[in-house]
Amino acid sequence: MNALVHSGDSSLRAAANARLIALIRAGAVALGVFLSGFVLREPAPYELYMAGLIAVWAVFGLRISRHAVPLLVLLVLFNIGGFISMSQLADIGDIPLYLAVSLFLAFTAVFFAAIVEAQPGLLDVIFGAWVAAAVVTAFAGILGYFQALPGAEMFTRYGRAAGVFEDPNVFGPFLTLPAIYLLHRMMTGRAGAAFLSLPPFLIVALGLFLSFSRGAWGLFLFSAVMLTLALFIHNQRGLIRLRITAMCIAAVVLTVVGLLVALQIPAVADLFAQRAQLVQDYDSGRLGRFARHAIGFLLATERPLGIGPLEFGRIYGEDTHNIWLKALLAYSWLGFAAYLTLIAWTVAAAFRMLFRARQWQPYLLCTYIVFIGHIALGSVIDTDHWRHFYLMLGMLWGMMALEQRRQAGLGKPLSAAVNEEKPRLKMVGAAGFEPTTP
């Protein structure tokens, strides 16, 4: 009897320790994701914290499976291309620090892929922390734009809301995935979850609008439309479709009313009229954005080893503002080939599993749509050091690894696989998705 009691106590202690470790891991990941919303300079607190987190996690059992190896290899090749390009410079200056940040962000993508594959439940933690960071930085940007508090103007740049970011053009896209995730919850979640998602959504959406970033506006509009179409097509139940339609109408009305109210403020109206133009003077000038693109791609055909990171901006006064051109000139043809392969692989592999009934399917759908938007946005802006881009990339590869492991069956008998899937289908159904055959 005493042996049984002792055994029971040991089991309880082991379970309590396991829960404590899981809680510590979740908190550590949440803090890292939250810090990604505060980037005023490089290296940012995010880099310093994540370097320590990855090191500690590696000591206690970070495992990179064979499913994440292609991600690691392609990102390393991309950065090797950067060092090849740096070799073309006589004066390297601060280029090593720039490439160190590039390589580190690549490792963060691999880290997030590994932990998502190992613990799918961390996706909920990651999205929750990202929403929290978006609300805080968006609220700071709103306060700064309207100068609601003394010193709040520090949260603006060029008269536009920037939150706790150095550039409004990064601040706006950072807010997009949280906004789309909250929109997804309002469209498909239970009534309570949908209602609770509305206030943070309005804060994030207003912050995104006040960034006056045309790229962020287009990214959010594209992502919202794609999300709506995906949910409408995939869900066959009339009640869900009716709810999605009602939410769309409400969103359009709310957007129009909010825009009309905002435009009553002269400063907002003037800046909106200026930023709403599709082509700005610095886009179409003699050495504007598009002219520099043409010059840069012509130059890239002559320089297979690149011209050196950051060198294009020093020569022409402005950076490439194009991730593909940046890859060619700053990371050589090798880096460009690796980056192109990585993006094509990610897009194709994630698309194949986009509508399969999985526990992580809502996270996959939101991340995939916004990721596609970022790829398009990369044609007019440089996304090279965007922390949240690497976070999305890591999450996608983590979910791709989960799908590969599931398809392989992990050696489990069929009965075990079926029993394991039952609660997942219930969770997916609660989010408004109908189970489908793999």
Image (tube, rainbow, N blue to C red):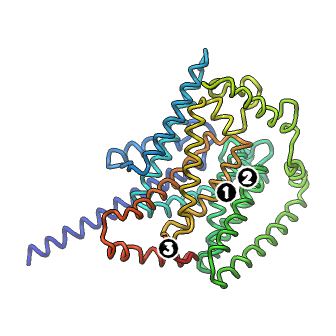
Of residues 128 and 229, the one drawn nearer to the viewer in this rendering: 229
Q: Which amino acid does the dot numbered 1 rest on?
A: Thr
Residue in the image at 55% along x and 51% along y: 346
Nearest to viewer (mark 2 / mark 3): 3
Please tell me which of labels 2 and 1 falls first in the chain.
1
Q: Quadrant of the N terminus?
A: bottom left
Asked if residue 327 is positioned above or below residue 115 in the image, the reply reads above
In the rendered image, which residue does mark 1 sit on? 176
- Quick check: can you spot residue 158? yes
Of residues 186 and 333, the one drawn nearer to the viewer in this rendering: 333
Q: Position of residue 305 (x, y in %)?
A: 60, 24
Nearest to viewer (mark 3 / mark 1): 3
Residue in the image at 45% along x and 73% along y: 424
Mark 1, Cα crowd under 10 Å, few <14 / some 14-19 / many 20+, is many
Q: Which amino acid does the dot numbered 2 rest on?
A: Ala
Dot label at residue 437: 3
Q: Which amino acid does the dot numbered 3 rest on?
A: Thr
Q: Position of residue 254 (x, y in %)?
A: 79, 70
Cβ atoms at labels 2 and 1 below 8 Å apart: yes
Give the alpha-carbon distance from disc 3 to disc 1, as whole Å. 30 Å
Residue 10 location, quadrant: bottom left
Helix, strand, or loop for circle 1?
helix
Give the alpha-carbon distance from disc 2 to disc 1, as whole Å. 7 Å
Dot label at residue 286: none
Helix, strand, or loop for circle 3?
loop
Determine the residue located farthest toward the top in the rendered image: 90
Dot label at residue 216: 2
Helix, strand, or loop for circle 2?
helix
